[in-house]
Amino acid sequence: MLTVSARSTASAGAPFEATTIERRDLGPHDVLIDIAYAGICHSDIHTARGEWGETLFPLVPGHEIAGTVSAVGSEVTTFAVGDRAGVGCMVDSCRECEHCRAGEEQYCLEGNTGTYNAIGEDGRPTDGGYSEKIVVDEAFVLRIPEGISLDVAAPLLCAGITLYSPLRHWDAGPGKQVAIVGLGGLGHMGVKLAHAMGAEVSVLSQSLKKQEDGLRLGADHYYATGDEGTVEQLERRFDLIISTISATVDMTAYLNMLKLDGTLVTVGAPPEPMTVPAFALIPGRRRLAGSMIGGIRETQEMLDFCAEHGLGAEVEVISADQIDEAYDRVVASDVRYRFVIDAATIAG
Ligand code: NAP
Ligand code: ZN
Ligand code: ZN
């Protein structure tokens, strides 16, 4: 076992504290990664505050991990010491079910093993990226291409892939009207990716506060849903709408913005059920869908796409002592656009 420094929370909503955790000894297929940066995803907050039901405490969150390989197991073939490596939301899956075999490990029929708040192969709770080092099977480690620095790469491992996968699945590209709802961590990556794929991109935000940023990130249009007349103006405008809203809201207005056969995909995962009237779906043969991160192969494809197009996240690097404050700012939509913890500050 390897003892490493980490930051954990003891119960729902409790402040983060400096602690140590044990990482397993390297198995033949394991990779040891010295973490450089870990992003703060709103899912970390939902989990740490107990909003999604049972959380395994003490909790070390973090599933947007970027770092450097510092040791490899005896049979590892895909990574070597010194390689730039990333870990996202899952660290294992059954690898045998039809979805795993199809490269959609996130939808594993046995349930994938979460990077944190899950039980790992050694029978102990998994601990995430708010730590100095992590041990992961090489099959669940991604290559971070040269040309993307590690701080702006970290958020790609969740925010990036969570938007890339539905944009690809629903064919975002030239001639498509795509709207991204919510300009936060996921949303800002959605704007960059959809623009790079060639779609005409609109941001639907609660206000115009971030309009200049949205246009700079690649949006063609920017709307404040709270402004009078906006909702009516956008009726039947979009082929694809991706909602990143973290709070429970009424989806009626967004559904009415879909064209015939349009799709509204929620990647936002609010704790309470959303309002979805049948008569917002029926008149336009509209679809309401969900999407969860992406498979390992697709995550690598996304990282390579980002390198090719010069994309990374817009980040604010913080020290580990600022995690509580950063959580409050994310919940208040006061993030531009992802907080990333500098792992060198974790030991305190
Ligand atoms: P975030 O940075 O907090 O962004 C969420 C955005 O939603 C905010 O910036 C805000 O945008 C908008 N919003 C918040 N409250 C709203 C409200 N009451 N009405 C309308 N808009 C509201 O969070 P994130 O890290 O991007 O995560 C977003 C959600 O996706 C979370 O629920 C998270 O758990 C979930 N998630 C899902 C997956 C998946 O695989 N499906 C993966 C990662 C995260 P504006 O300020 O622009 O209005
Ligand atoms: Zn996430
Ligand atoms: Zn499986």
Image (spheres, rainbow, N blue to C red):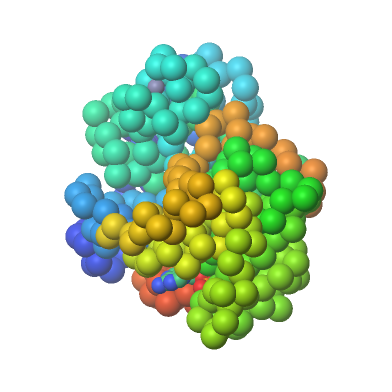
Considering every residue shown, the one lying at the far front of the view is 283
Going 51% across and 47% down the picture, which residue do you hit? Answer: 285
Q: Is residue 120 left or right of residue 282?
A: left
Which x, y percent locates residue 100? 46, 21
Going 60% across and 29% down the picture, which residue do you hit? Answer: 297
Q: In this view, does 28 lie to the left or right of 159?
A: left
For the residue pair 155 and 233, the one nearer the viewer reads as 233
* Residue 97 versus residue 35 in the image, above or below: above
Which x, y percent locates residue 214? 68, 71
For the residue pair 300 and 284, the one nearer the viewer reads as 284
Q: Is residue 138 left or right of residue 234?
A: left
The image quadrant where one finds the N terminus is top left
Going 40% across and 17% down the picture, which residue do you hit? Answer: 97
Q: In which quarter of the image is residue 107?
A: top left
Going 71% across and 78% down the picture, which residue do you hit? Answer: 212
Residue 314 visible within the image: no
